[in-house]
Image (cartoon, rainbow, N blue to C red):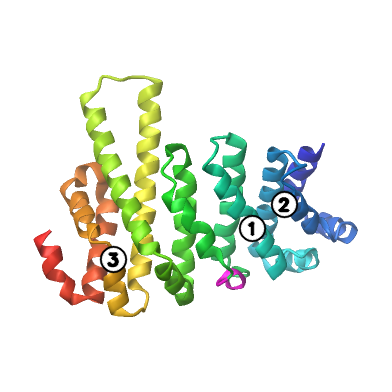
Amino acid sequence: YSRVCMLAFIVLVQSSDAHDELVSFFANEPEYTNELIRIVKSEEVVPGNIRTLAMQALGAQLGAYSSSHERARILSGSSVSFGVGNRMILLNVLQRAIFSLTNTNDLTCIAFVEALLQFYLFHVTSSTSGSAVRGSGMVPTFLPLLEDTEPSHTHLVCLAVKTLQKLMDYSNTAVNVFKDLGGVELLTHRLQIEVNRVINLAGGNEDSMVVGDCLRINDDLFDTQKRLIRVLLKALGSATYAPANTARTHNSRDASLPFTLSLIFRNVDRFGGDIYSSAVTVMSEIIHKDPTSFPALHDT
């Protein structure tokens, strides 16, 4: 029954012709958003699939809030703007959920983390609420996912990196926090891992006679890894491009980055033009920010 109720709510807030129903709903249920947040943070007593649906309902509500001024007016009484208290509650929930991923491959746990990450990605990019979350402790919460190399979690790492990249695009403070916490080194190391994985996986596919489901799973993994490489390069570009102390930028950059970029250039047939272009952009930004790095890049 709880699942049906939350699915019905998701449909309601996403329906373009349901203004009167939304007004009526929140007139009768002004605390519904807080109820959803209570469900999300109730780790001990609420099943994981219910918590995931509650998080998806919060995301749908945020999407509706951001879609038009009329929707924002209707939902303004529902606490959807998420005060500091609610934001910190959800960040703490996300932090614990990310930590729990290291001990399990439970699909329910993975789905819950994905719903949280999707919510924060939309929250950061939302024109109506994005400014509210900047500087709210997101960077240290998201960074541990960069070290999660479990293949079944790759799509979660993609969402985390994409959110960090958007956050750095909007906030110089986020860039400085990201660099101070070793974020550039983590991005560089993860890029190196994924580039080598794609090269090895592509080489394995060329030499194998595997057909059917195994080949399809390999193709899906291959596509996910390439998607992660694209967002890693974009995040490195955002971290490199943003105004910062040149000496710190140079010192924080892992020496393996030029070598990893050269691997992409040498294997363009395996990575494609989009990744190649992003790698060139990162190299250009490195030279632009620190021209003295050119000889090392040239040697590599």
Residue for badge 3: 253
Q: In the rendered structure, which disc, 1 or 3, sits on the residue that comes first in sequence?
A: 1
* Helix, strand or loop under label 1: helix
Q: How crowded is mark 1: few (under 14 residues within 10 Å), some or many (20 or more)?
A: some
- Amino acid at pointer 2: Lys
Tell me the distance, in whole angstroms, between the alpha carbons under discs 1 and 3: 30 Å
Disc 2 is placed on an element classified as helix
Q: Are marks 2 and 1 in contact (CB under 8 Å)?
A: yes
| Between 98 and 220, the one nearer to me in the picture | 98
Looking at the image, the residue that sits furthest to the front is 103
N-terminal of the pair, mark 2 or mark 1, is: 2
Q: In this view, does 115 lie above or below 211?
A: below
Give the residue displayed 25% in from the left and 51% down from the top: 273
Indicate the position of residue 174 as horizontal and vertical percent values.
Answer: 48, 71
Please identify the quadrant where the N terminus is shown: top right
| Callout 2 crowding tier (Cα within 10 Å): few <14, some 14–19, many ≥20 | some
Image coordinates of residue 69 in percent, x first then y, are 69, 69
Reading the image, the residue beneath label 2 is: 41
Residue that appears at 15% across and 48% down: 266
Q: Is residue 1 left or right of residue 11?
A: right
Residue range corresponding to the magenta coloring: 131-135
Q: Which of marks 2 and 3 is nearer the N terminus?
A: 2
Residue 15 seen: no
Mark 3 element type: loop
